[in-house]
Image (spheres, rainbow, N blue to C red):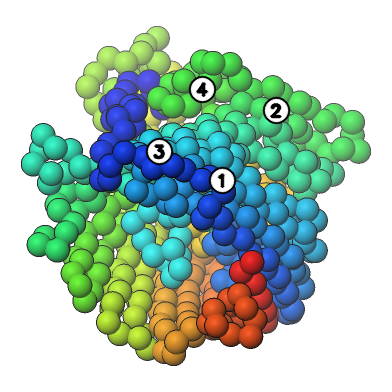
Amino acid sequence: MTKRTYTLVAAVLGSLSVFGQTEGGADAKRDIFSGIGAYAETQVTVGKGHNPLWLNANKYGLSSLDSDNGYLRVAVERDVAADSTRRWGVGYGLDIATAYNTTSSFIVQQAYFEGRYKLGSLTIGSKQQPMELRDNELASGAQTLGINARPVPQVRLGLNDYWTIPILGRWFAFKGHLAFGMMTDGNWQESFAKGTPNKWNKNTRYHQKSGYLRIGKDDEHHHLTLTLGLEMAAQFGGTVYNWAGTDENENHEEAVKLKNNLGSYWNAFVGSATADAGEGIYENAEGNILGSWVARLQWNDDRVTAGLYMDHYFEDHSGLFFLDYDGYGSGENWNVKERSRYFVYSLKDFNLGFDLQLKKVKIVNKFVLEYMNTTYQSGPIYHDRTENISDHVAGRDDYYNHYCLSGWQHWGQVMGNPLYLSPLYNDDGYIGTHCNRFRAVHFGVAGDPLQGLHYRLKASWQKGWGRYADPYMSPKENTSLLLEASYRTPKESSFLRPVTFTLGLGADFGELRGDNKAVQMTVKYEL
C-alpha cells in the first residue's frame, strides 16, 4: 500500500499521545506489592483425532491440536486497575507453564510491566489483550486482533479506556493503541517446515494499531451508542529461509534478509510502498499489512445489553477502500499513471454478529449469533498491468497468507479468527492457512443457573473452498461443538481459597477438520 493511503490513519492514531482525564484526587501513598493476584492451574485433555476446535481455540495459544495434551500453569499478576483511584498506576505479571504435546514444553505465556498515567498506558512485554467490540467468551473471534495465538512480546502505547472529547459536547469518545514487537516462533517454524518445500521465517518484526470512535453517551440517561473502528497490523523484517522452495536434502536452503531499519518501522506504521525482496517493478507495501474495519451498534441499560457488530477484513486497497487504481497508460506508458480511473470492489466478506446480555436473568444470560463469509477476497482474478494489457485488477487477496512471510499466525495458530484453518492442521509443513475461503454460522450461549456454577455452549457450522491458489476439488464442511461447565467454590469453603473446576466436552464432525472428540478437565486454584 502507498504512503498516501495511511497518512490519515497515522494522524488519527497519533492522538494516542493525548492522555485523557480520570476522576480522583491526588495520589495517595502507593504500595506496588498490594493487590497482587496469583493462581495455579492444570489442564488435561484426552480424546480421539485432533483436539476439537472449541477446546483448542481462543485460548491465547496455550492449547494444542494433539488429542492428548495438558499443562501446569502458575501466574502472578498485579492488575493496573489496583491503582484505579490514582493518576499513576503500576501493573505487572508473570505467567509460565510447562506442557506436553504442545508446540513447546516450557511456555512463557505472559511477562510484562505496565505503567499508566490517567488514561494513557505503556506496556512492555507479552500480555494477553482481549478482543474489542464483541463477547470474548462466546464470539468466534476477531479477524485481525484475535485471542487465538500466543501474545507477541511488544512495546505498546495506548488509551485503555475511552477518552471523552470535551469540545464535542462529550458525545464522542476515543480509544486505541499502537505497538511494535517481535515474533518468537522462529525455531518452531523451522522444525515445522524444514525438510519440505516450504519457507519459514525468523526474527519477524510485528506492528499493530487500533482506533475506535464511540458516538453517544454511555451512561444511565443515554443507552444507545455507535462505535466505529479500524484495527491494523503488520509483519516485516527478519529472515526468510528456503525462499526457493527446495528441501534440506538438496543443500539449496536459501536465506534472504528482509529490510529491518528505522525506515522499515515507519513503513509498517504508515503502509509505505517500499518493495520487499523479489517484487521488482510491481512493488507493494513492505511486509505483510492487514486489518479490519469494525463497528458496533449497542443498546445498554440496567436490564440488557444488546449489540450488532461487524468485522470486515482486508489485506490491500481492494479490501480497505473497495477500490484500486486502474488508470495506467498503454504502450510505452503501460506503467505510468495517466488517468483518474479506479476499479471498484464489493463488500461481500464480513463477520456479522449479534449478542445479547440479560443482566437480571441467571439460567441463560448471554447469547451470540454470527454469520461469516470470506469467499470473495476481491474476486478470483489478479492481473498486474503489462505492455499489452494495462488494466490492473487486484483480486485473489489470499487472507492470512503472504508470499515471503509466514502469514497471520504465531506458533502455528492464526492470530485472528480460528475458523480460518490454522497451520497446525497442516501435515505438509506449510506455514499458512490452506482454507481461507469459507462461509460459517456460529452460535453461543452461556448462563449461571446456580451460585458458583457457570456453563457455556458453542456450535459452529462451516463450509470451505480452500484457497484461490489451491482450491478443494469439492467443498468441505465441518460442525464444531462445545459444552463446558465450571464450578467455583466459595471463599469460606474447606479449600480456604477459591478453586474452579471446569469440564469441557468438544467434538468436530466433517472433512474440513476431521472427526474429533475430546474431554478436557481444568482445575484452577487461586493462591
- Give amino acid for label 2: Thr
- Front residue of 475/515: it is 515
> In x, y percent, where is residue 202?
71, 34
Between the residue at mark 1 and the residue at mark 4, the CA separation in whole angstroms equals 27 Å
Between the residue at mark 2 and the residue at mark 1, the CA separation in whole angstroms equals 32 Å
The residue depicted at 58 percent of the width and 16 percent of the height is: 261
Closer to the chain start, of discs 4 and 2, is: 2
Q: Is residue 208 visible?
A: no
Kindly state the secondary structure of the residue where label 1 is placed. Answer: strand
The residue depicted at 71 percent of the width and 75 percent of the height is: 45
Between the residue at mark 4 and the residue at mark 3, the CA separation in whole angstroms equals 29 Å
Kindly state the secondary structure of the residue where label 2 is placed. Answer: strand
> In x, y percent, where is residue 324?
32, 32
**Which of the 4 image quadrants contains residue 302?**
bottom left
Closer to the chain start, of discs 4 and 3, is: 3
> In x, y percent, where is residue 103?
75, 55
> In x, y percent, where is residue 56?
62, 67
Which residue carries the number 3 mark? 88
Which residue carries the number 4 mark? 265
Closer to the chain start, of discs 1 and 4, is: 1
Give the vertical position of 135 relative to 409 (above or below). Answer: below
Which residue carries the number 1 mark? 92
Crowd tier of the residue under label 2, counting other residues whose Cα lies within 10 Å: few below 14, some 14–19, many 20 or above:
many
The quarter of the rendered structure image containing the N terminus is: top left
Closer to the chain start, of discs 2 and 1, is: 1
In front: label 3 or label 1? 3
- Give amino acid for label 1: Tyr
Between the residue at mark 3 and the residue at mark 2, the CA separation in whole angstroms equals 40 Å
Kindly state the secondary structure of the residue where label 4 is placed. Answer: helix
